[in-house]
Image (cartoon, grey):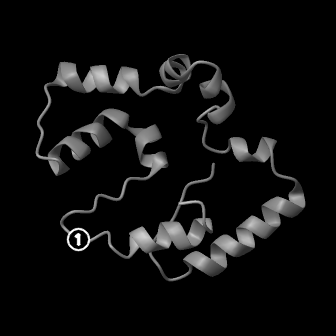
């Protein structure tokens, strides 16, 4: 799990059409978490009521998880904001990442939202 990011992600992406693989992207969860929770429940064949879905949504918010994890959560998790990487990458790091992203994901159909 700690190997090269693209090898890890593309390994699972190649399996995305198998009946026992659900490929979920963080960006989709940020856009509509209740819908993604429902999709996961459908995949697992475990229906939840709307109230139960909202309980899961509330429990999986970054603030809730940070509080649950205590001090470790403050170190391990960041803000959970798409595009926050700009506050951590230098211009050179950003260019290098963009180049590797284009090279490794070209013609795979896999895309990520960075802003």
Residue found 70% across the figure and 41% down from its top: 84
- Image x and y of residue 59, in percent: 38, 22
Please tell me in which quadrant of the rendered image residue 101 appears: bottom right
Q: Position of residue 70 (x, y in %)?
A: 58, 18
The quarter of the picture where residue 34 lies is top left
Q: Residue at x 56, y 22 (%)?
A: 66
Neighbor class of circle 1 (other Cα within 10 Å; few <14, some 14-19, many 20+) is: few
Q: Which residue is mark 1?
A: 18
Instruction: Give whichever of 76, 98 is nearer the camera.
Output: 76
Q: Where is residue 47 shown, x and y percent of the image? A: 11, 36
Q: Is residue 92 above or below residue 73?
A: below
Q: Specify whether residue 40 is in view.
A: yes
Asked which secondary structure carries label 1, the reply is loop
Residue 16 vertical placement versus 46 (above, below) = below
Q: Compared with residue 54, is residue 8 higher up or lower down, i.e. above or below?
A: below
- Whether residue 78 is visible here, answered yes or no, is no
Q: Nearer the viewer, residue 3 or 94?
A: 3
Is 84 left, or right, of 49 in this rendering? right
Q: Taking 55 as reference, is 17 above or below it?
A: below
Name the residue: 35% across, 59% down.
23
The image shows residue 3 at horizontal and vertical percentages of 60, 66
State the count of labels.
1
Instruction: Compare residues 12 and 111 and report the one nearer the observer.
Output: 12
């Amino acid at each position: 799990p700690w190997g090269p990011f693209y090898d890890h992600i593309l390994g699972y992406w190649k399996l995305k059409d198998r009946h026992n693989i659900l490929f979920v992207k963080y960006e989709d969860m940020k856009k509509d978490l209740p819908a993604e929770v429902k999709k996961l429940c459908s995949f697992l064949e475990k229906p939840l009521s709307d109230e139960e879905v909202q309980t899961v949504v509330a429990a999986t918010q970054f603030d809730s998880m940070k509080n649950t994890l205590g001090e470790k959560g403050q170190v391990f998790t960041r803000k959970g904001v798409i595009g926050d990487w700009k506050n951590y990458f230098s211009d050179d790091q950003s260019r290098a990442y963009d180049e590797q992203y284009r090279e490794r994901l070209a013609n795979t159909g896999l895309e990520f939202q960075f802003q």
